[in-house]
Amino acid sequence: QVQLVESGGGSVQPGGSLRLSCVASGSVFSGYSMGWYRQAPGKQRELVAEITGIGRSNYADSIQGRFTISKVNAKTGIYLQMNSLKPEDTAVYYCKLRNRWGPPDYWGQGTQVTVSS
């Protein structure tokens, strides 16, 4: 089993910044991939950014150039630095981990990000 703990959500004005953190514990093995997804009210959950098992970063077009995903040093975890936030970034953000052999996927509890003036 894998446990994921997220933190760092909150409310911010348009143009502001937030940093999300996700730390994993449990049965995590080398070659895992981790990523951030988000789900806005009435919409499907979508990929925001991920780091693959070989260290490649992928981003959704909608956040390209504004968000940066990175690994937490000395821990199994990831950050999501979010700059130039827009109201359309408002959503619940979820962290996901997949071990190198594939499913199951493990999800965090989600953290709310609200961008509003």
Image: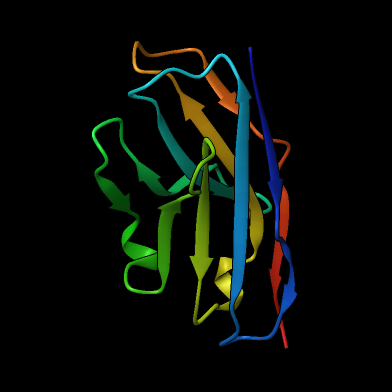
Q: Is residue 80 left or right of residue 52?
A: right
Q: Is residue 32 left or right of residue 76?
A: left
Residue 108 locus on image (x, y percent): 66, 35
In the rendered image, which quarter is residue 88 located in? bottom right
Of 74 and 17, nearer the camera is: 74
- Residue at 42% from the left image edge and 54% from the top image edge: 70
- Residue at 60% from the left image edge and 65% from the top image edge: 19
Image quadrant in which the N terminus is located: top right
Of 77 and 82, nearer the camera is: 77
Residue 45 locus on image (x, y percent): 54, 42
Q: Is residue 52 left or right of residue 82?
A: left
Color style of the picture: rainbow
Residue 75 locus on image (x, y percent): 54, 39
Residue 102 drawn above or below residue 58: above
Q: Is residue 33 left or right of residue 92?
A: left
Image quadrant in which the C terminus is located: bottom right
Of 29 and 107, nearer the camera is: 29
- Residue at 63% from the left image edge and 26% from the top image edge: 25
Residue 36 drawn above or below residue 76: below
- Residue at 73% from the left image edge and 37% from the top image edge: 109
Residue 100 locus on image (x, y percent): 34, 17
